[in-house]
Amino acid sequence: GAVVSQHPSWVICKSGTSVKIECRSLDFQATTMFWYRQFPKQSLMLMATSNEGSKATYEQGVEKDKFLINHASLTLSTLTVTSAHPEDSSFYICSARVGGSFYEQYFGPGTRLTVT
Amino acid sequence: DQQVKQNSPSLSVQEGRISILNCDYTNSMFDYFLWYKKYPAEGPTFLISISSIKDKNEDGRFTVFLNKSAKHLSLHIVPSQPGDSAVYFCAASDRDDKIIFGKGTRLHILP
């Protein structure tokens, strides 16, 4: 149980285009989902917290107009990287929280984004 | 400034021996600490955790030790097995409901 999927697993796009990444909780409902970003040999950095039916809460330094997050249902959150640039190339990981235990986060497999 | 530090990027341990992964933190407000394990092309999976009111938590082959005065925690794996080869992330959280991760330590279990 508690499986989280991401789609796509990897994507290559051209500068200036937008890319949408989906995060789904497959066998449970997640009221809260988190989006992380990881650069090579760096830690997972929390980008935003997404609550179903409300606006996402972004961490300091994360541009909300560039990284659009939509959490339209209890099983799906999407991250759209708008007007992508090569510096947006990174590994994006989502996680979904079960119930109220903040530490019970289940992570997706991640999406590798390469912007050329 | 990194609040959770894993100063060893990699560690090699003989199969059957003890693996000790270390983690330091700077924020004294952290009240919960977690270890995650990550295989390539997969997301991190929760391994073990410890509350700041405890100094040890054990789960099978895995034991986490917390030294609050030194702001240090460690994960012990004994005996180490080939399947333990992975990247291990130390993480911490305060009542702000966010998890702060370290950079990870890659553990290699040698045959």
Image (cartoon, coloured by chain):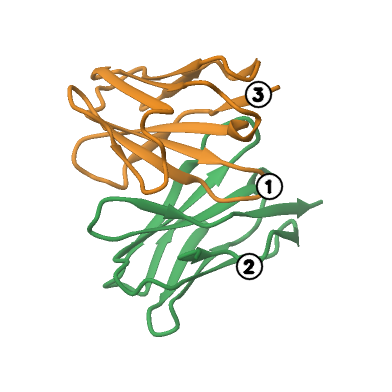
Chain colours: A orange, B green
Q: Position of residue A76 (x, y in %)?
A: 32, 17
In what element is the residue under mark 1? loop
Rendered image quadrant of residue A113: top right
> Is the residue at mark 2 from the same chain as the one at mark 3?
no
How packed is label 2: few (under 14 Cα within 10 Å), some, or many (20 or more)? some
Q: Which mark is residue B63?
A: none
Q: Which residue is mark 2?
A: B7
**Residue flagged by tag 3: what amino acid is it?**
Val
Residue at 65 percent of width and 23 percent of height = A115
**Residue flagged by tag 2: what amino acid is it?**
Asn
Q: In this image, A102 relative to B19: left or right?
A: left
Q: Quadrant of the C terminus of chain A?
A: top right
Q: In this image, A51 relative to A103: left or right?
A: left
**Residue flagged by tag 1: what amino acid is it?**
Ser
Residue at 45 percent of width and 38 percent of height = A36
Q: Which residue is mark 1?
A: B85
2 or 1: tag closer to the N-terminus? 2
Q: Position of residue B18 (x, y in %)?
A: 65, 66
Residue at 26 percent of width and 51 percent of height = B97
Q: Which residue is mark 3?
A: A115
Give the mark toward the camera: 3 or 1: 3
Q: In which chain is the residue bearing label 1?
A: B
Give the mark toward the camera: 2 or 3: 3
- Spatial separation of the CA atoms under disc 3 and disc 1: 31 Å
In what element is the residue under mark 3? strand
> Is the residue at mark 2 from the same chain as the one at mark 1?
yes
How packed is label 1: few (under 14 Cα within 10 Å), some, or many (20 or more)? some
Q: Position of residue B76 (x, y in %)?
A: 55, 65
- Spatial separation of the CA atoms under disc 2 and disc 3: 30 Å
Q: In this image, B45 relative to B8: left or right?
A: left
Please say if the residues under marks 3 and 1 sit with CB atoms less than 8 Å apart. Answer: no
